[in-house]
Amino acid sequence: MAKRVGMEVSIAASEAVKLADVDVIAAYPITPQTHIVEHLSEVVADGELDAAFVPVESEHSAMSCCLGSSAAGARTFTATSSQGLALMHEILFIAPAMRLPIVMVVANRALSGPISIWNDHSDIMAEQDIAWIQTFAENGQEVFDLVLHAFRVAEDSKVLLPVIVNLDGFTLSHVIEPIEILDKAEVDKYLPPYKPKVRLDPRKPVSMGLVGIPEIYTEAKKATDEVLINSKKIVLKAWKEFGDLFGRYYNPVESYKTEGAEVILITMGSISETAMTAIDKMREKGLPVGLVRFRLWKPFPAPEFKKAIAGAQTLAVVDRALSPGGACGPVAEEIKAALYAERGRPKVFNFIAGLGGRDVTVENFEEIVSKAFAYAKKRPKQFYEMIGVREI
């Protein structure tokens, strides 16, 4: 039976991996991800999990090891962050091309330089085009649940793609929260044993990862793109199954108080809960504002997003990563592309916040909304004085 305990979120991620009964964990320590694989090394050493824990010499090697173990048919897990994810970059593209259902947790952290160990989304936004399924967690319970969901989706025979679960470093990874931990029997109802369709076996030789000559390269890339897009059906199905079993339902796009909202904030990750507090405060002052946040990032859930923002006049998109030299941040860029051909589309304003671990407060969200209204020229000066926020 599930039990509710106070637990560090990183440890909750590890407990989900343990309950998934993984076969291989390949990892290299990097702040703020280290507690995840450190705990897994302990449960393997203590005999609580029958798995191979491979302490490699770099993140590049960690992902390379994961490719080999997954190709051999093993349920495989790793975790990383920031520069470690960047060091994996060369290898990340290979996993989806070879249809290897690896699961990885990324404790999001700012990229250098300057050196920063604190949270933003620059590491994962630099990896948008790797063809991995990607989800974002807001709190510890979601981290635990999304890790189990990741294995369920990745290993589905209609998907067979790697999955990343993103959680904000330190602001989420290192906090202690009450989390409902499922027991093994419950997890087994949701996550069946992994049965690979094709695997490396000297008794039945196959070739994987061969050269793609020009005559087939485009088709191979298109095939990967198609299976990633189509994976959303399984993502949704697996969330429905999870909710039916355990009472916690997830959606690719989540809404908060968007009824009648003229301005909608767009967020991802743990700052979404701060944004909800700001929404409550602004709603009490009569400000028609709501919140939409992404749970699924890749494949991008365009239909669900358009439905969630229907009726809004203005979007205030909060990016936690810069796109140097670009027109806007990566999330705003994706949103603008999705809405480009829509009739009566809302105005989209982009705000960069929380880089390198800088706090994003309730007051910051109030200021963002104030600016969005001002940019859209919806309100007179007296309006801002009434709600108590600074006019632009």
Image (spheres, helix red, strand yellow):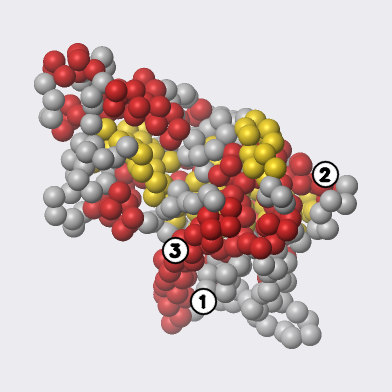
The image's mark for residue 10 is none
Quick one: which residue is furthest to the bottom in this view? 204
Lateral position of residue 254 relative to residue 9, left or right: left
The residue depicted at 55 percent of the width and 41 percent of the height is 167
Do the numbered discs 1 and 3 sit on residues whose CB atoms are within 8 Å? no
Instruction: List the residue tagged with mark 1.
Output: 212
For the residue carrying disc 3, how many other residues have a C-alpha within 10 Å: few (<14), some (14-19), or many (20+)?
many
Residue type, numbered disc 3: Lys
The residue depicted at 22 percent of the width and 38 percent of the height is 260
Look at the numbered disc 2 and give the secondary structure of its residue: helix
Instruction: List the residue tagged with mark 2.
Output: 42
Quadrant in which residue 316 is drawn: top left
Query: For the residues carrying marks 1 and 2, which lies nearer the camera in this image?
Result: 2
Badge 1 or badge 3: first in the primary sequence: 1
C-alpha gap between disc 3 and disc 2? 35 Å
Quick one: which residue is furthest to the right in this view? 46
256 shown above or below 114: below
Of residues 94 and 271, which is closer to you in this image? 271
